[in-house]
Image (cartoon, rainbow, N blue to C red):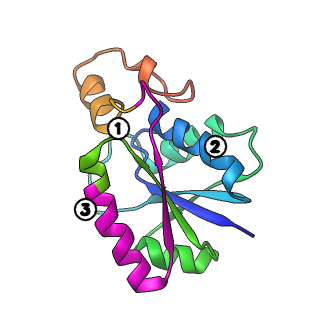
Amino acid sequence: MKRAVFPGSFDPVTLGHVDIIERAVPLFDEIILAIGINLDKKYMFSLEERVRFLEETFKGEPKIIVKTYNGLTVDFCIKEKAAFILRGLRNTIDLEFEKTIGQTNFRLAGIETVFLISSPGKSHISSTVVRDIKKHGGDYSILVPDAVPNK
C-alpha cells in the first residue's frame, strides 16, 4: 500500500492545502492528514476544530484519514507504515526549507518526501495570512474551505 503523511498544523486548513491534497489523492492508496501537536505553539483554532475542519472538508474521500501526533514526523510515519511525506511548494523559499527537512527525514528513516507545486492562483494562500486576516476582523472566506467558519 502506498501511504503518505501530509503533516501540518492546519491552523486553519486553507484552499492551498486542499489543492495539494486533492491532487495527491490519485498518487496514493491512503493519505494521512497529520496534525502535529506542539505544546509550545499558540494556535488560533483548537485541535478539535482543526480535526473537524479537515474531516468535514474531506468527508467524501475514503482515501483520506485525519490523525494527530506528537514528536517527529518520521517517527509518526514509521508508526503508521507510511513510506512518503507529502508537502506542497508555493515558492523557492518553501523549496529550500522543505528540501532540507526532506533530506534529513530520508537520512533518519528512509522516508521519501514527495513535493507538489501549488496550482496557479493558490501560491499566495497560507495559514499565516488567514490568521492575520482573522485577527484583524477581515473576511478570509475566499482562502479556506467551507468547513472553516469566517467569524
Q: From the viewer's side, name the closer residue of 36 and 113.
A: 113
Task: Please name the amino acid that badge 1 sits on.
Answer: Ser
Disc marking residue 40: 3
User: Could you classify mark 3 by the number of other residues whose Cα lies within 10 Å: few (under 14), some (14-19), or many (20 or more)?
Assistant: few
Task: Please name the amino acid that badge 3 sits on.
Answer: Asp
Mark 3 → mark 2, Cα distance in angstroms: 25 Å
* Image position, residue 95 (x, y; %): 31, 53
Residue that lies at the very extreme toward the top in this rendered image: 139
Going from the N terminus, do you reach mark 1 or mark 2 first?
A: 2
The magenta stretch spans which residues? 96-122
Q: Quadrant of residue 29?
A: bottom right
Q: Residue at x 45, y 35 (%)?
A: 16
Q: Quadrant of residue 71?
A: bottom left
Disc marking residue 20: none
Disc marking residue 55: 2
**In the depicted structure, whether residue 51 falls above or below residue 105:** above
Disc marking residue 127: 1
As for residue 102 lying within the magenta part, the answer is yes
Instruction: Kindly report which numbered mark, 1 or 2, lies closer to the viewer in this rendering.
Output: 1
Task: Please name the amino acid that badge 2 sits on.
Answer: Glu
